[in-house]
Image (cartoon, helix red, strand yellow):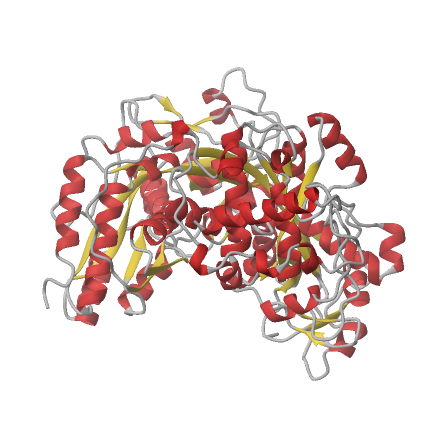
């Protein structure tokens, strides 16, 4: 395998240098020596030398920066799915601050940070482990300035003007300083809302380091770091890049800093930035790569990207993986070295797809030297080139599957998005690597609309098609669609109440909260359900979906079932008029999760995995038998037991008792019984069959309940009907 040979090549270079008396494996090239001379190109492996290595088996845990999370998760999916399926890698995108803290605390095998360790952090790490950590740069990325200005499709800002906005010196979009940079643009007399990170963040470090370099006022009064005191009075915070993106989207007049891929994924327009040469530059892959050209990089590979000119975008930075030079068991060290080497040598195309700029060859060679220093660069596997005995066993060969090739496009529900994206990564990475599947998590409403409009090959919805939608779909295509249930999931009730670790609610009380009948957390109806809990006299803020959503359909169908007032005055559907006066909306499950986190006193409904991923506490719900049930994998599965399912597989889960969690629902893939090209139909049927028959373990990991055996068989019958009417 290429990555293993590459590690051995780098070690060979270092050992030869040691034998010559000029260097040891721990030494770096001199500052004035080109990095390429430290790792000659003739030492690089050729295609002819690439061999298949024995499989590895290990579990790696990492945590840190959200800035590179999209590419790290993509690399992990490809590596564990297609390169080393015996290796499990769990990366938690908790922000650079948390990642550094957990790494120094030795809670993880590796850390990730967009800010290199400070001298104090470096010393603390060395003291904690008894050896030094290494900084391994992986990619360069752009910190984009996203904005929310209706009708403004093009915006230019400069460093000094941006600093004044974030300082609170410029507070309106029609300020003369902004107008001067945007001749001919009709800027509104609208207040500027500054959106920033509320957690310790390497993205913040890159951004504030840039502001400190362009503004003495910022440097003297705020400074640079993973966390700062934000001076602008009209500002809002969000956790991780997702949270800032949500704040920008939800606040007209907002401007905030986010990693470029998050802006593009969420459809957020971004400003051009004037660089040091006076050029207004759009953040792109090319302009990010140009920003990194010509920078001086010290031996320890800790550096900033500043004073960018030419065609370079000026707010850019590297991101690092942090690893130890001692203390791993051999198996962990081998797997960690192999994975990071694969990222650096094989991951460039995936990085570019997500608009991260790969390292230049000279810096890649220096980064690989750092990889070789993990655990001292010495372990049994690397020194012998042979796998350890306990890992050498292989299974009997399996029959070669029929390999498919093509592209599938789908869109819809965010409720099942975590498992759909995980399934897609595994299927396209390990089962059918020549199949490309693009699933856009735009909400059930948009997914149904695009499916009926025949803009996608399949749709995703947590609400089955209504009779009207089914008729419209049939008229549009000339044949009926099929509903294919995939998993069951719980709609959790997340809340934000400081000091309240356990909360119980009932259906009628929850309905009254969302109706606006109950407006304070110390209301007697809530207190009755929570004896012994000190409930605050705090206003309740209702957080709900602002887009058409199957999660909303599940939730409002449940409220209609438990509250006559809700059923008669509001009703059920993917979109409703929310009656509670003190309410806030968010797009997709991510947006509601952000609203809950950012508003003390908030309560909202989100798919369970989003609550757990974001560390949001969830309420127990009293079911039809009077049992207070926590949403879990087991209680979701129990909710689905014994329900009556019609032939068309369109059903709700209501009246749940026993040990079942009462707010649960299925989610469906929508597909056509006619009209596909043969190759598309074969791919879609193969992928859906694989998800239903092979995807249970992944679903359970993400707290989705797989279908029962009997329902799975009925769902597979629907899969077989795809293109059957041609």
In the displayed structure, does residue 438 sit left or right of residue 111?
left
Residue 150 appears at what percent x and percent y?
A: 59, 70
Q: Quadrant of residue 268?
A: bottom right
Number of numbered labels in the structure image: 0
Residue 501 appears at what percent x and percent y?
A: 55, 24
Q: Nearer the viewer, residue 256 or 523?
A: 256
Q: Nearer the viewer, residue 706 or 168?
A: 706
Residue 674 appears at what percent x and percent y?
A: 15, 66
Q: Residue furthest bottom?
A: 184
Q: Identify the residue shown where x is 66% and y is 60%.
A: 362
Q: Quadrant of the C terminus?
A: bottom left
Q: Nearer the viewer, residue 641 or 524?
A: 641
**Is residue 535 among the parts visible in the rendering?**
yes
Q: Identify the residue shown where x is 72% and y is 32%.
A: 125
In the displayed structure, does residue 687 sit left or right of residue 710?
right
Q: Residue furthest front?
A: 20
Q: Quadrant of residue 141?
A: bottom right
Residue 130 appears at what percent x and percent y?
A: 71, 26
**Is residue 95 among the parts visible in the rendering?**
no
Q: Give the answer, above or below, for where 267 lies relative to 72.
A: below
Q: Nearer the viewer, residue 19 or 150?
A: 19
Q: Identify the residue shown where x is 80% and y is 64%.
A: 170
Q: Identify the residue shown where x is 57% and y is 35%.
A: 496
Q: Give the answer, above or below, for where 534 lies relative to 375.
A: above
């Amino acid at each position: 395998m290429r990555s293993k040979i590459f590690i051995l090549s780098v070690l060979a270079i270092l050992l030869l240098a040691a034998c010559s008396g000029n260097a040891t494996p721990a030494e770096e090239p001199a500052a004035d020596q080109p990095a390429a001379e430290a790792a000659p190109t003739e030492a690089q492996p050729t295609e002819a030398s690439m061999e298949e290595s024995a499989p590895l088996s290990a579990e790696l845990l990492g945590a840190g920066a959200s800035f590179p999370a999209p590419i790290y998760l993509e690399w992990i999916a490809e590596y564990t799915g297609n390169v080393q399926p015996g290796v499990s890698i769990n990366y938690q995108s908790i922000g650079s601050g948390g990642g550094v803290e957990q790494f120094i605390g030795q809670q993880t095998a590796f850390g990730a940070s967009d800010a290199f360790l400070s001298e104090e952090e470096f010393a603390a790490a060395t003291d904690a482990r008894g050896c030094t950590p290494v900084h391994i740069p992986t990619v360069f990325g752009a910190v984009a300035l996203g904005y929310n200005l209706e009708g403004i499709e093009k915006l230019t800002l400069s460093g000094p003007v941006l600093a004044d906005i974030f300082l609170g010196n410029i507070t309106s979009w029609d300020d003369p300083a902004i107008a001067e940079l945007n001749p001919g643009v009709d800027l509104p007399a609208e207040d500027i809302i500054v959106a920033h990170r509320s957690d310790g963040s390497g993205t913040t470090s890159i951004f504030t380091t840039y502001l400190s370099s362009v503004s003495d006022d910022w440097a003297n009064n705020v400074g640079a770091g993973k966390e700062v005191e934000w001076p602008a009075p009209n500002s809002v915070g969000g956790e991780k890049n997702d949270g800032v993106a949500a704040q920008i989207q939800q606040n007209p007049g907002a401007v905030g800093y986010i990693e470029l891929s998050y802006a593009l994924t969420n459809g957020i327009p971004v400003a051009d930035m004037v660089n040091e040469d006076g050029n207004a530059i759009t953040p792109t892959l090319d302009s990010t790569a140009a920003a990194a050209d010509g920078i001086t990089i010290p031996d320890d590979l800790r550096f900033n990207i500043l004073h960018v000119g030419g065609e370079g975008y000026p707010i850019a930075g590297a991101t690092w993986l942090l690893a130890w030079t001692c203390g791993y068991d051999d198996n962990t060290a081998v797997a960690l070295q192999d994975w990071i080497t694969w990222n650096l040598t094989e991951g460039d195309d995936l990085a570019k797809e997500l608009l991260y700029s790969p390292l230049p060859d000279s810096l890649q060679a220096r980064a690989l030297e750092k990889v070789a220093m993990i655990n001292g660069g010495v372990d049994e596997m690397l020194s012998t080139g042979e796998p350890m005995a306990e890992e050498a066993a292989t299974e009997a060969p399996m029959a070669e599957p029929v390999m498919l090739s093509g592209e599938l496009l789908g869109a819809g529900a965010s409720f099942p998005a975590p498992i759909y994206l995980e399934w897609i990564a595994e299927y396209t990475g390990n089962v059918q690597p020549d199949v490309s599947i693009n699933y856009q998590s735009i909400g059930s409403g948009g997914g149904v609309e695009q499916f009926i409009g025949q803009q996608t090959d399949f749709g995703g919805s947590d609400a089955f098609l209504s009779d009207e939608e089914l008729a419209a779909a049939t008229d549009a295509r000339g044949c009926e669609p099929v509903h294919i249930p995939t998993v069951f999931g719980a709609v959790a009730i997340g809340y934000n109440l400081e000091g309240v670790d356990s909360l119980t609610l009932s259906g009628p009380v929850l309905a009254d909260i969302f109706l606006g009948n109950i407006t304070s957390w110390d209301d007697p109806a809530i207190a009755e359900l929570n004896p012994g809990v000190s409930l605050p006299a705090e206003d309740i803020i209702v957080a709900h979906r602002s887009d058409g959503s199957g999660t909303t359909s599940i939730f409002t169908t449940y409220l209609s079932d438990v509250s006559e007032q809700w059923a008669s005055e509001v009703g059920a559907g993917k979109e409703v008029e929310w009656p509670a006066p003190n309410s806030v909306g968010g797009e997709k499950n991510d947006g509601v999760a952000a609203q809950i986190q950012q508003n003390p006193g908030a309560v909202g409904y989100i798919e369970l995995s989003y609550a757990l991923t974001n560390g949001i506490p969830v309420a127990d719900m009293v079911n039809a038998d009077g049992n207070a049930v926590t949403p879990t994998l087991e209680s979701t599965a129990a909710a689905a037991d014994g329900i009556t399912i019609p032939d068309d597989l369109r059903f709700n889960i209501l009246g749940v008792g026993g040990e079942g969690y009462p707010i649960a629902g299925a989610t469906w893939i929508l597909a056509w019984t006619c009209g596909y090209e043969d190759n598309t139909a074969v791919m879609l049927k193969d992928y859906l069959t694989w998800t239903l028959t092979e995807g249970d373990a992944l679903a359970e990991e993400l707290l989705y309940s797989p279908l029962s055996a009997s329902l799975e068989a009925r769902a597979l019958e629907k899969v077989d009907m795809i293109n059957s009417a041609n």
